Image: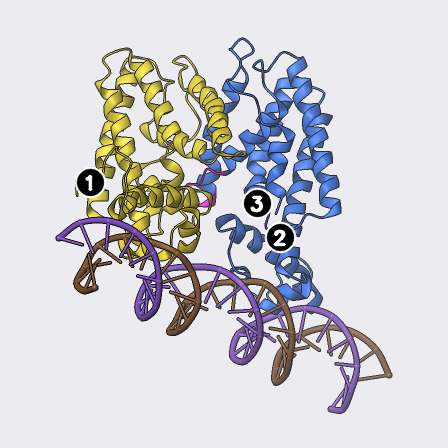
Chain colours: A blue, B yellow, C brown, D purple
Amino acid sequence: METTSTPPLSGRKAQAARNDQVILEAARAVFVADPGAPISAVAERAKVGISALYRRYPSKEDLLRKLCSDGLKTYIVAAERALADEGDAWTSFAAFVRDVVDADTHSLTINLAGAFTPDESLYRDSAHASELTVQIFDRAAQAGALRPGLDVADVTMVFELLASAHLGDEARTFEIRRRYLTLLLDALHLPSAPPLPGPPPSVEEVNERWNT
Amino acid sequence: METTSTPPLSGRKAQAARNDQVILEAARAVFVADPGAPISAVAERAKVGISALYRRYPSKEDLLRKLCSDGLKTYIVAAERALADEGDAWTSFAAFVRDVVDADTHSLTINLAGAFTPDESLYRDSAHASELTVQIFDRAAQAGALRPGLDVADVTMVFELLASAHLGDEARTFEIRRRYLTLLLDALHLPSAPPLPGPPPSVEEVNERWNT
DNA sequence: ATAGAACGGAACATTTTGTTCCACAAGCTA
DNA sequence: TAGCTTGTGGAACAAAATGTTCCGTTCTAT
């Protein structure tokens, strides 16, 4: 029971703190696999009682909001890191996209859209994330590194496309996503290719998912 | 009883025949939007009572099987048409991929995997579809039209990636899929590009979805 | 007019699931 | 040691969802 290995922990509070982590990780894994999964599935995965969940989050909806919020923050961190990079515009763009795909922030975003009513802070973060993405995109576009006719929204769609790829366990899924990310990046990085057909996704279209 | 074809139908049998169609279309639309949707949702969408459904299919599972089976047959038709084309290998490969994406046969296949126990005939069709796909792929590969290191399974994954794209209504979804299909095809059609990272999906990996 | 096919949709029986509640364990304090 | 507080497990509960059945009704052909 007291196998508190790595951190010098003194007992109950330490376990509680660790549970904070364990629960979030379990919740993430469970809801990525099945967006409609019951709360009890999260508890089982975390090897924790249900009350441990309800002590932290007033309701399922709050837990989902928290997961989404964390994902957004991860995204923002990756974006800010990319913007801080003073090197080649294409290189930092590609690194950013790779980071986001690896962080897998969109598996939740897509699946959970509409499962809870967004938060005020969530709106703020979302807007912030959009701005940063635009900057990264524009920098690459102005450097002439992008296929003509591309729009920032295309980048978001690429994230969603890749987030939908699943194969075997988590490690294999990430590997396979890298494979198709390579494919997509190559296709994005063709300044002399013809533009893509049809209009890119508009902001309204992308945001519509959060209704209801 | 065979008067139920083109002419303006009056009568119960005519309505019944039309309902066969209406129900399948409604079921498809409903389950693509939400794989876990209740039977009643299908009835509502088809503007039909529940008994009209149960008159045709003994259970929900049978309906799902039927939908999947129809999708496979559509896929096979597209594949055979591509193989019958004696023209350029790449062109008929690309046309095949476009046809399948437009037919949207994978939205169901992906979402419904595991929701019913496969049929004997379904296994047969599935094997047949695989063979045809291999032929189309190999022809393009031997013509030197494909990026090195690609595998047939990559084509399947491309279908699944695109099937996950959704935006607005159905028409817009198809339009946007065309957009990213163009992107992906361009990336596949690069004989001198470096191979993609990581091993391609294996047959076992792709088939594992049908377990449980 | 009558038989029977096709249908609509309420009713039923489960199953599922979010949430509450309470008894108990572990640390903390006096 | 005896309370007090925090955190936990998980049974219990109430509400909702859902696959399937059932029965009365409508429409067609004879």
As helix, strand or loop, the secondary structure at mark 3 comes to helix
Pointer 1 residue: B124
Residues under numbered marks 3 and 2 in contact, where contact means CB atoms less than 8 Å apart: no
Amino acid tagged 1: Arg
Nearest to the observer: residue B124 or residue A101: B124
Residue A109 pos. (x, y %): 59, 42
- For disc 2, the chain is A
Q: Residue D25 falls in which quadrant of the image?
A: bottom left
Pointer 3 residue: A108
Discs 3 and 1 carry the same chain letter: no
- For disc 1, the chain is B
Residue B166 pos. (x, y %): 50, 35
As helix, strand or loop, the secondary structure at mark 1 comes to helix
Nearest to the observer: residue B124 or residue A4: B124
Query: In this orientation, does residue B160 appear?
Result: yes
The magenta segment: A164-170
The residue depicted at 43 percent of the width and 24 percent of the height is B196
Q: Which mark is residue B4?
A: none
Q: Earlier in the sequence, mark 3 or mark 2?
A: 2
